Image (cartoon, helix red, strand yellow):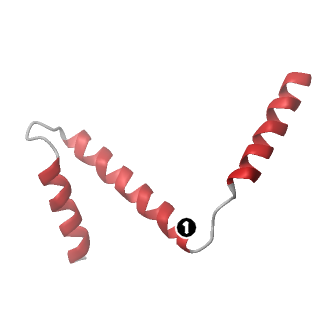
């Protein structure tokens, strides 16, 4: 837990003095998403870029034909 508190302290130090509570919440949210994404990547829970591109290409091509 101390690690989380340290991260929040570091974030607060980086944010401007006039930031809002919403600013703090947003930055905490983004930090959490980045950490989750890195954990997914470390665990191999990712989709290769080429596969994503191909799926999007097929989706858009089908969407244009219909």
Quadrant, the N terminus? bottom left
User: Is residue 66 something that shows in the picture?
Assistant: no
Point 68% across, 52% down: residue: 49
Q: Position of residue 56 (x, y in %)?
A: 76, 40
Give the left or right position of residue 8, taking residue 39 as reference. Answer: left
Residue positioned 20% across, 76% down in the render:
2
Residue 24 is situated, as x and y percent measured from the top left of the image, at 23, 46
| Residue 35 percent across, percent down from the top left | 42, 63
Name which quarter of the figure residue 61 lies in. top right
The answer to whether 59 is drawn above or below residue 47 in the figure is above
Total labels: the figure holds: 1
In this rendered view, identify the residue nearer to me: 49 or 40: 49
- Image: 27 above or below 43: above
Residue located beneath label 1 in the image: 40
Q: Is residue 26 visible?
A: yes
19 or 54, which is in the foreground?
54
Residue 56, placed above or below residue 13: above
For image coordinates 68% across by 59% down, the residue present is: 47
Measured along the vertical axis of the image, is residue 52 above or below residue 63? below
């Amino acid at each position: 837990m101390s690690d989380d508190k340290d991260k929040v302290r570091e974030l607060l130090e980086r944010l401007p003095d006039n930031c809002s509570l919403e600013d703090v919440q947003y930055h905490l949210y983004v930090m959490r998403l980045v950490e989750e994404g890195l954990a997914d990547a470390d665990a191999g829970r990712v989709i290769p870029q080429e596969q994503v591109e191909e799926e999007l290409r097929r989706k858009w091509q089908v969407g244009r034909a219909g």
